Image (cartoon, rainbow, N blue to C red):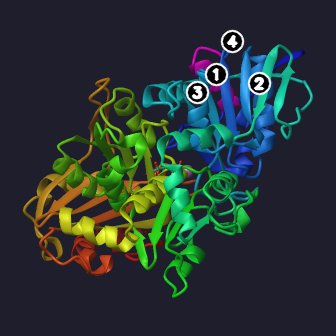
């Protein structure tokens, strides 16, 4: 094997964000850009010599080319083995499972998740560590340091390998194992859920629609829902992964999964609807005529998980990201189990899961998961819902009504202001940050502020501290607003405004979220002065 060291780099701006490095695809395709980031990752983990890795992606444009390059780099850096999904495809939760099951040193996920794909859209890469989870901040910081001083990368000139055929091959001394990306994952799900009961539910005439959004969960959902659980053919739509996700945003929310939403709100709606994102770690849940917010979904799953065999012993605790609504806290309180509040991004759940402090985790951005892997897991959430529906024999809207009557309802919505000039977005955040102290007691738009701070996370397992994780403002009557800037965007800044209003169990729960949240929204508009700072008050996307 002929090994070359190519002089390149450093490239500016290779700082991993909320979930790895995300850039425009053309940026990743610049000669040496991907290579320098991958070499920096190897350097940051003490080299690849003798180590095994998993590689897989969501099938977006540049996925296969990137994998071919990275395999040659792994070989040139002395890796012992790389496990790759057939065709270069593996969902994010399935990568996490493969790392854990095969005991590899780590793995690479090639995805920009819910961002659109294509040569003029987005690409991304994320490194996961041996527990199967995203590299924690101490490692992403090391990676970033390496990207700033790198002067070249190692690669071999070996020919491309055939990613299409399951089996073993090699690049020099490095073994390459091409695996079916679905089978291990399906086995894992079968061990957690009552497949016989879910099969019986489908046999009884229960109908669902799963929108794979032309992304990686297509093959998984086909194999599991239709192939194993007996859902009728056609249950899974948009099932073939495509390089540009059919030209859409593979983001499972009511805005981007509109086709599914329209069907679920129509007279001919099936009993249950769900969708997943580009890399298969997000989920949207919708019943007939009833959209379930991700924060509520986490709470319902926490309250009912014991109905599934994998969780019948109960939960150790529940963790949610800070902007996620407090609905799951209410459940944890009632169950007498611990609850945790972490910064945005799945990497912060890893320590809690490893230490056995929590069993379920979730984010308001349609991410839910458990200790079965160290990533959020879209299909897992759908299967847990199916298991619960099969056990309870109620509709989604009946389950929601019961839930709110027991725990109260946390009305919730996220407003995104996209492609804001970075300077203006930073000025808005800084303006609020500067006034946090004086906000308490003020009454913007007539609502009294009871607390205001900037969230810092103190990891209870390793003692690390993460600052600047979002501005939070609480209002009298259990209302709350959170402000933060996105760490996954590739254009300007995205301002996220998270709105929440609690209505206790004794109250009615049938307001539209928009109505229930109007006072908190008005207060935020006044506090931020967004009209004059970013020139708008209407968001681009409401979820
Ligand atoms: C967003 C979400 C966050 C999620 C992250 C990665 O981050 O808000 O909850 O963990 O995306 O999800 P940000 O920094 O843009 O708000 V995925 O499915 O895109 O890997
Ligand atoms: Co994702």
In the picture of the structure, the residue carrying the numbered disc 4 is: 49
Q: Helix, strand or loop at disc 3?
A: helix
The residue at the point 51 percent across, 35 percent down is 134
**Rendered view: 390 above or below 190:** below
Of labels 4 and 2, earlier in sequence is 4
* Above or below for 25 versus 359: below
Measure the C-alpha gap from mark 2 to mark 3: 24 Å
Residue 39 within the segment the image draws in magenta? yes
Quadrant, the N terminus: top right
In front: label 4 or label 3: 3
Q: Which residue is mark 3?
A: 101
Q: Nearer the viewer, mark 2 or mark 3?
A: 3
| Extreme residue in the bottom direction | 267
Q: What residue is at 49 percent from the left and 73 percent from the top?
A: 271
Residue position for label 2: 73
Magenta residue span: 36-47
Front of the two marks 1 and 3: 3
- Residues under labels 4 and 2: Cα distance? 11 Å
Given residues 98 and 476, the one toward you in this image is 98
Q: CA distance from mark 1 to mark 3?
A: 22 Å
Distance from disc 1 to disc 2, alpha carbons, whole Å, reads 10 Å
Q: Is residue 262 left or right of residue 336?
A: right
Mark 4 in CB contact with mark 1 (< 8 angstroms): no
Question: Which comes sooner in the sequence, label 4 or label 3?
Answer: 4
Quadrant assignment, res 345: top left
x%, y% of residue 55? 69, 33
10 Å crowding of disc 3: few (<14), some (14-19), many (20+): few
- The residue lying toward the viewer, choosing from 184 and 43, is 184
Mark 4 / mark 1, whichever is N-terminal: 1
């Amino acid at each position: 094997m002929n090994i070359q060291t190519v002089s390149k780099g450093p490239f500016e701006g290779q700082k991993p964000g909320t979930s790895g490095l995300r850039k425009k695809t053309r940026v990743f395709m610049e000669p040496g850009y991907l290579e320098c980031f991958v070499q920096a990752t190897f350097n940051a983990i003490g080299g690849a010599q003798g180590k095994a890795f998993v590689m897989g992606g969501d099938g977006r444009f540049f996925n296969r080319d990137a994998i071919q390059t990275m395999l040659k780099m792994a070989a040139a850096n002395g890796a012992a083995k790389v496990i790759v999904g057939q065709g270069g495809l593996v969902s994010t939760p399935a990568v996490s499972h493969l790392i854990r099951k095969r005991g590899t040193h780590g793995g690479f996920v090639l995805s920009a998740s819910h961002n659109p794909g294509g040569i003029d859209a987005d690409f991304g890469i994320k490194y996961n560590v041996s527990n199967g989870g995203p590299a924690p901040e101490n490692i992403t910081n090391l990676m970033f340091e390496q990207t700033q001083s790198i002067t070249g990368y190692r690669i071999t000139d070996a020919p491309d390998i055939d990613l299409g055929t399951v089996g073993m091959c090699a690049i020099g001394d490095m073994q390459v194992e091409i695996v079916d990306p679905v089978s291990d994952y399906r086995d894992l799900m079968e061990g957690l859920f009552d497949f016989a009961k879910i099969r019986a539910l489908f046999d009884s005439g229960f109908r669902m629609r799963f929108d794979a959004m032309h992304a990686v969960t297509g093959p998984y959902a086909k194999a599991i829902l239709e192939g194993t659980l007996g859902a009728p053919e056609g249950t899974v739509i948009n099932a073939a992964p495509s390089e540009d996700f059919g030209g859409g945003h593979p983001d499972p929310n009511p805005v981007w999964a509109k086709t599914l939403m329209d069907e679920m709100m129509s007279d001919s709606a099936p009993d249950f609807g769900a969708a997943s994102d580009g890399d298969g770690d997000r989920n949207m849940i919708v019943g007939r005529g009833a959209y379930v917010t991700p924060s509520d979904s986490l709470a319902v799953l926490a309250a009912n998980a014991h109905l599934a065999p994998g969780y019948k012993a109960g939960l150790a605790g529940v963790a949610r990201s800070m902007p996620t609504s407090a609905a799951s806290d209410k459940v944890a309180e009632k169950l007498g189990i611990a609850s945790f509040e972490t910064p945005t991004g799945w990497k912060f759940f890893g320590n809690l899961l490893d230490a056995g402090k929590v069993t379920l985790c979730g984010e308001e951005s349609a991410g839910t998961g458990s200790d079965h892997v160290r990533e959020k897991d879209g299909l897992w959430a759908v299967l847990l819902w199916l298991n619960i529906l099969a056990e309870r024999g109620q509709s989604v809207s009946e389950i929601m009504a019961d839930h709110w009557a027991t725990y109260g309802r946390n009305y919730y919505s996220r407003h995104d202001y996209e492609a804001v000039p970075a300077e203006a977005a930073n000025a808005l955040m800084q303006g609020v940050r500067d006034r946090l102290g004086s906000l308490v007691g003020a009454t913007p738009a007539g609502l009294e502020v009871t607390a205001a701070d900037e969230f810092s996370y103190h990891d209870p397992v390793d003692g690390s501290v993460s600052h600047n994780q979002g501005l939070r403002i609480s209002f009298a009557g259990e209302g709350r607003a959170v402000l933060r800037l996105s760490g996954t965007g590739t254009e300007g800044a995205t301002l996220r405004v998270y709105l929440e209003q609690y209505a206790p169990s004794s109250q009615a729960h049938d307001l539209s979220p928009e109505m229930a949240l109007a006072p908190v929204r008005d207060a935020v508009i006044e506090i931020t002065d967004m009209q004059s700072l970013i020139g708008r008050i209407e968001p681009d996307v409401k979820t």
